[in-house]
Image (spheres, grey):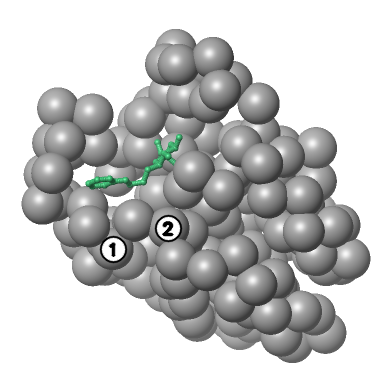
Amino acid sequence: MANGILLVLSGPNLNLLGERQPEVYGHDTLDDHLAVVEAAAAAQGLDVEHVQSNHEGELVDAVHGARGRCSAILVNLGALTHYAWSVHDALAAFEGPVVEVHLSTPAAREPWRHTSVVAPVADGTIAGLGAEGYRLAVEAVATLLAR
Ligand code: CA2
């Protein structure tokens, strides 16, 4: 069962997970979340590619590189979620499913986190469930790919 490649996109500061603010983001590191994604993806016949960047343009380039090559994108854009319209436009040009994930619940936090520029171009969003959200996002991707 080969379902292709799942691109996991991680935005700014997610490389610091596990080091600070565990009360908000938990104790797991980004590598811990990726291990969850890889296990869930393998069970669905998906290979995983991961790009973490603290630079908006690199994330745009990663989405362009996924076009015509990757089956789906799982994205946690970090704080860029709230204002990176260039990534919004790039995701709009991607043909496969896009699932947005957040460890915390941005809608329950500061007002500036209440807007997501990813949400309008995502098939769905999972927020507030920590590592479980990453696992559920892979399940959602597999369900969307099977449609
Ligand atoms: O809840 C999420 O997953 C977020 O995307 C995490 C972002 C935040 O800006 C979004 O509003 C919601 C933050 C990424 C990690 O930031 C850290 C900062 C310091 C130490 C550890 C992580």
Which residue bears the numbered disc 2? Answer: 12
Residues 107 and 142: in front is 107
Quick one: quadrant of the N terminus? Answer: bottom right
Q: Position of residue 76 (x, y in %)?
A: 50, 51
Separation of residues labelled 1 and 2 (CA atoms):
7 Å
Residue 137 visible (yes or no): no
Q: Determine whether the beta carbon of the residue marked 2 sits less than 8 angstroms from the nearest atom of ligand 1.
A: yes
The amino acid sitting under disc 1 is Asn
Q: Which is more toward the observer, 143 or 92?
A: 92
Secondary structure at numbered mark 2: loop
The disc placed on residue 126 is: none
At x 34%, y 56%, the residue is: 13
Q: Which amino acid does label 2 sit on?
A: Pro
User: Is 140 displayed left or right of 147 in the figure?
Assistant: left
For label 2, count other residues whose C-alpha is less than 10 Å away and answer few (under 14), some (14-19) or many (20+).
some
State ligand 1's quadrant.
top left
User: Does residue 102 appear in this view?
Assistant: yes
Secondary structure beneath label 1: helix
Q: Residue at x 80, y 37 (%)?
A: 120
The answer to whether 49 appears left or right of 120 in the picture is left
How dense is the environment of label 1, judged by Cα within 10 Å: few (below 14), some, or many (20 and up)?
Answer: some
Q: Quadrant of the C terminus?
A: bottom right
Residue at horizontal 60 percent and vertical 65 percent from the top: 56
Q: Does the residue at mark 1 contact the one at mark 2 (Cβ under 8 Å)?
A: no
Is residue 11 positioned above or below 59 on the image?
Answer: above
Asked where in the image residue 133 lies, by quadrant, the reply is: top left
Q: In this view, does 23 lie to the left or right of 105?
A: left
Q: Identify the residue at horizontal 23%, vertical 29% (top origin).
A: 24
Residue that badge 1 annotates: 15
